[in-house]
Amino acid sequence: MAATSPLMNTYGRLPVAFSHGDGAWLFDTDGKRYLDCLSGIAVNTLGHNHPKLVAALREQVARIIHSSNLFEVPLQTQLGAKLVELSGMTNVFFCNSGLEANEAAIKIARKYGHEKGVAMPEIVVFDKAFHGRSLATLSATGNAKVQKGFEPLVEGFVRIPLNDAAALQKVADERSNVVAVFLEAIQGEGGIQPAGIEFLREARRICDQKGWLLMIDEVQCGTGRTGKWFAHQWAGIEADVMPLAKGLGSGVPIGAVVARGAAAEVFQPGNHGTTFGGNPLAMRAGLVTISTMEEDGLLQNAADVGGWLIETFRRELGGLPGVAEVRGQGLMIGIELDRPCGELVKSALDAGLVLNVTADRVIRLLPPLIFTREHAQRLVDRLAPLVRAFLERPQAQAA
Ligand SMILES: *Cc1c(COP(=O)(O)O)cnc(C)c1O
């Protein structure tokens, strides 16, 4: 209750506290065990208590946690080189969160515009997008609930529906101040809504033609979750600017914006900065996350286990009245119902499953990338009956 909590009332929290985790399992303070199908919202890439992560972080904490960007940070250079290698892009700026990475991307786009002589640059954004909760990123977000009460919004965003190539072409034909297109490869908070492969290719083509930056928010869908390092790689295209965060540190706060071409050279000394960003502890977490993913074949695992889950949920639930669609890529999965289903989060918890519902009607599954077929089978065995029972209950009369 707000009156007795020392915390601001920003979350309607569930009455469970986790004391520890082990692999894909979480344990609450009463000792009850839960299968983690959420990873702290796509964060715990390696699951909980991973021996390689724990050893690396222990060692790093004992060595140095933070120095400052006033000095060389060798681990930052190392992780930067790794992200450059995996993305095919050229330069990285490290920060601490998704919104910070997106804020940096927005600043890059604006300065890129100014350098081209566009005094009032505009960025194309999309319905149902989520980019964060700073003033600029909530303004880029396509959800009135996130914006309400915080007006005036930051200007300079033009919004169109996702996957509407004609709308994007219309913007290209009619608006001369646009400098960038900014989208999630798969919308996360918006309900696991993928940008279609054809749409991504069309966006790439228009950006090339117009000299716009294609900025792909991979904060949630990136870092291997879909079975490729970055989700837009499924479309065979390259981004110009790519914000990352959530899963990159397996739980240690981290953000990064990766860029190439002109976008990579926009920031010069004094244009942008951060106190904590790129600190040795977070960089070590990023490095061990990526090296463990490589050593343990977690990209392939995400593709295999995720593919099996999507197929199995389609078979188990796909035909039921009340199930609109099962969709996703790798271990980023949405089961969309025809009605609000937030209460399923609580019944899942009772059944020993941690999951989430987003966009009111979409059951969102974001398990750690160490999830095995056995874990996946348990998830199906526990969740499918809950969804069936939920759909069989008489619906409250719509007002
Ligand atoms: C979570 C998320 C953000 C915001 O990240 P924070 O670390 O919470 O600031 C931005 N974009 C996308 C796509 C996200 O899923």
Image (cartoon, rainbow, N blue to C red):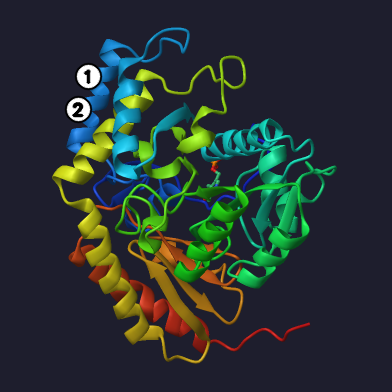
Residue 318 x/y as whole percent: 41, 86
User: Which quadrant is the C terminus positioned in?
Assistant: bottom right
Q: Nearer the viewer, residue 99 or 20?
A: 99
Q: In the rendered image, which quarter is residue 38 located in?
A: bottom left
The residue shown at (70%, 63%) is 160
Q: In the rendered image, which quarter is residue 155 located in?
A: top right
| Residue under numbered circle 1 | 59
User: Which quadrant is the N terminus positioned in?
Assistant: top right
Residue at the front extreme of this rendering: 209
The residue shown at (37%, 51%) is 230
Q: Identify which amino acid the numbered label 2 is placed on.
A: Ala
Q: Is mark 1 within 8 Å of ligand 1?
A: no
> Considering the numbered disc 1 on the image, is that residue within a helix, a strand or a loop?
helix
Residue 172 x/y as whole percent: 69, 59
The residue shown at (19%, 44%) is 294
Residue 56 x/y as whole percent: 22, 26
Residue 187 x/y as whole percent: 53, 60
Contact (CB < 8 A) between labels 1 and 2?
yes
How many angstroms separate mark 1 from mark 2 (CA)?
A: 6 Å
Q: Nearer the viewer, residue 58 or 86?
A: 86
Q: Is residue 324 above or below residue 91?
A: below
| Residue under numbered circle 2 | 55
